[in-house]
Image (cartoon, rainbow, N blue to C red):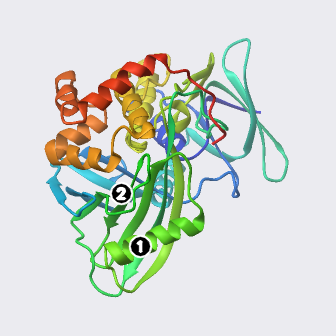
Amino acid sequence: MLDADVAIIGAGAAGLSLAHRLSSGAAGRRTPSVVLLTAPPGPLRPPRRTWCFWEAGSGVYDRALTASWQRLRVRGKEGSSTESRIAPLRYKMLCSDDFEELVHHDLAGRASVRVTEAVVDSVEGLSGGGAQVHGSTAAGASVDVRARWVFDSRPLEALPAARTTLLQHFHGWFVRTDRPAFDRDVVDLMDFRTPQPARGLSFGYVLPTGRRTALVEYTEFSAAPLTAHQYDAALRHYTGDVLGLGAFEVTARETGAIPMTDAVFARQTGEAIFRIGTAGGATRPSTGYTFAAVQRQTRAVAAAFRAGRRPAPPPAHSVRSRAMDAVLLRALATGRIDGADFFSDLFERVPAERLLRFLDGRTRLREDLSVGLHTPVLPMLRTAAELPWLPRRPSAEI
């Protein structure tokens, strides 16, 4: 039996971020003991992936960044483009392998954290307070952890009931071209010169890391993912017919699907058991961005520990932000708005720095209203009026 102040289940973005923050307390203050439970190598470990986020100035994980930019571009369906400088913000690209290496390097020098490989089978609250985690190693040996608090970041098997659920699904190629083909100073955040689905939207996404290297992705917001053949066909069309890259080598691939839903995620499942990360509602429903909200969530938990407060994770997004997201998701799912035109117009009409703060839930009501006036008002109002009458239905397994 292992005993600790905190048990963290899962060593993805949320689990590692929380372990990192809890173990880096200020001098003179007690640092909680932590057991970080990570899945053994195999199918339970998440695949390599790329996280992007924006923030002002330097950040905790800048040492692991692949690249960062201060210029973003959005291209409309017909090829018109809006290019913006986002100072004082920077758009940052972080690969999971580099993030994990940085955090594990830091944790290795901190005696308060113990990393243990185990598959977690169950978590139960204890009558005297705290909780116990039951798991097993790859060899079948039992692993039990008793902790005052448990933070669970494992993906949910099924989404909570929702009125609207779309998927942001994508497939990307890391490419190396034979000739200089990219402007390394500009991210193509959304390039809508892709075939658009009947409901939802699709776009290309280009993160240049050099004149001849970039991550190029095809992304859709729609009800269901594509086949591997369809993703490859979409990327061949985008890299060849749209971008005209010429000859290139694919050096790596990534794929994924992010639920975009107005479901309400439970952040607490027991007196001492909490959910964090995507499982705790950190993913922004309207955009799929998660990493920045994970940092806010884990920073708040660590601050509560240092202040001697109950370390319940706060909501990752405000009630107002979630309400606006619910309207947008429903309008996209019903086809009442053209998704490509919606986002193109927003980036054309609203200063990019303000729009990014809006998408991060960091604008005031006055700014939210000014952004709303640049959307298709009547379809959005009609959608907002019907939402309270729509039932929440169980979602399929993730």
Q: Residue at x 44, y 23 (%)?
A: 314
Q: Estimate the x, y position of residue 355 in percent, counting from the top left.
A: 22, 40
Q: Amino acid at mark 2?
A: Met
Give 300 or 81, whichever is nearer the viewer.
81
Instruction: Point out the image quarter for the C terminus.
Output: top right
- Asked if residue 24 can be seen in this view, the reply is no
Q: Is 385 on the left or on the right of 395, as rendered?
A: left
Residue at mark 1 to residue at mark 2: CA–CA distance: 25 Å
Count of marks placed on residues:
2
Q: Secondary structure at mark 2?
A: strand
Q: Amino acid at mark 1?
A: His
Which numbered disc flags the more N-terminal residue, 1 or 2? 2
- Where, by quadrant of the figure, is residue 112 drawn? top right
Tell me the residue that label 1 is attached to.
237
Question: Relative to 370, is 97 above or below?
Answer: below
Tell me the residue that label 2 is attached to.
93
